[in-house]
Image (cartoon, helix red, strand yellow):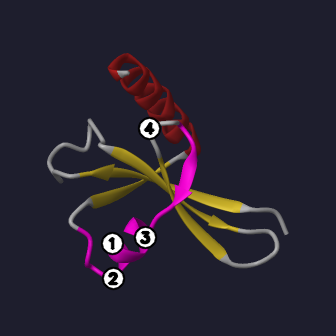
């Protein structure tokens, strides 16, 4: 079985979907299991609980499912933003 991935744009303000504050993904691993991750400022993926919290209604952030192509555009935007900040 191949790995399945769903991406989410993360916003702190539900009205500002055009400018997400983060990017999360949920991966269904080929060997079984699910792993939720957030993109970090060093452009690596690290385990995170925001998707599970959001699904339970416990997150302060809003998540919006996006396509893989949209996720790649967002990753590039974050890369430019975060490299410019350092």
Q: Is residue 20 above or below residue 37?
A: above
Cβ–Cβ below 8 Å for labels 1 and 4? no
Q: Label 1 vs label 3: CA separation?
A: 9 Å
Q: Label 1 vs label 2: CA separation?
A: 5 Å
Find disc 2 in the rendering and name its residue: 56
Magenta-tinted stretch: 43-59
Q: Residue at x 49, y 27 (%)?
A: 76
Find disc 3 in the rendering and name its residue: 49
- Mark identifier at residue 2: none
Identify which residue, 57 or 68, lies in the foreground: 57
Q: Is residue 37 magenta?
A: no
- Per the image, label 1 sits on a secondary structure element best described as helix
Find disc 1 in the rendering and name its residue: 54
Find disc 4 in the rendering and name its residue: 41
User: In the picture provided, is 71 more to the left or to the right than 33?
Assistant: left
Q: Is residue 7 above or below residue 53?
A: above
Query: Tag 4 or tag 1, which sits nearer the N-term?
Result: 4
Which quarter of the figure is the C terminus placed in?
Answer: top left
């Amino acid at each position: 079985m191949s790995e399945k991935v769903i991406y989410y744009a993360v916003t702190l303000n539900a009205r500002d979907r055009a400018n997400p504050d983060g990017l999360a993904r949920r991966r269904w691993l080929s060997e079984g299991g699910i792993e939720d991750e957030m993109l970090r400022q060093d452009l690596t993926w690290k385990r995170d609980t925001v998707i599970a919290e959001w699904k339970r209604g416990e997150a302060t952030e809003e998540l919006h499912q996006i396509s893989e192509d949209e996720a790649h555009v967002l990753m590039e935007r974050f890369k430019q933003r975060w490299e410019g900040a350092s």
